[in-house]
Image: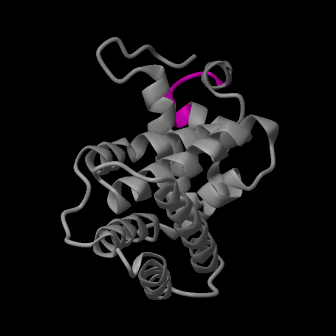
Amino acid sequence: MPGRHPRGPSARRRILNATLELVADGGYDALQVRAISERAEVSSRTIYSYFSSLDSLLIVAIGEQSQDLYRRYTLAPPRARTPANRVQKLIDELTDITTANRKLTVALFRALLSGKPDVEPFVRGFRDVLQTLLVAAIAPNGPTPADHETAEILQAIWFTALIGWATNISDANHTRDLMRRATRRLLYKR
């Protein structure tokens, strides 16, 4: 039976950390209850008391890992003169983060695209967070409906470009270049 950690991280935090470590090293196939349970020193029942599926666990783990970025960009968007330059700074940083570990990002996409009903709210949340970040970069002083529409389009292009990277169709530089071109075309008059 796994030991208690009265002064260490909570069971939930240990589960999240173990998930990230295992998937970063072994990819989606390493996302296994037994391995997570052993590394986090919790029972499988404890894992399922916090998370309805392994896919939702992985999405939450990655989402919580990126909370600092979210707070930073929504409270203080990148400083640049134009919306296009602010968006490009954001996209470059997001691309650097997501392409830093191919196994982790591919696993995230597999989880997001699993089609499982319990994952749907996380997919919406992932989309909404990215759109919020883009809106903050486009219009830090208050967005218009057109700004929200532009953010939605840019989010869809970036996600598609990252799928190309994750499946080895393109590289990270292509993703950055594609986003630079899309940003210029959508925000060129601003």
Q: Is residue 112 magenta?
A: no
4 or 117: nearer the viewer? 117
As drawn, 75 above or below 135: above
Colour mode?
Answer: one colour
* Residue in the picture at 41% in, 20% down: 10
Q: Please indicate, yes or no, whether residue 54 appears anywhere in the rendered image.
A: no
Range of the magenta residues?
38-44
As drawn, 131 above or below 106: above
- Whether residue 132 sits left or right of residue 1 in the image: it is left
76 or 36: nearer the viewer? 76
- Whether residue 71 sits left or right of residue 180 in the image: it is left
Which quadrant of the figure contains the C terminus?
A: bottom left
- Whether residue 96 sits left or right of residue 53 in the image: it is left
* Residue in the picture at 60% in, 55% down: 108
The quadrant holding residue 176 is bottom left
Give the percent coordinates (x, y) of residue 100: 41, 69
- Whether residue 141 sits left or right of residue 118 in the image: it is left
Give the percent coordinates (x, y) of residue 80: 20, 69
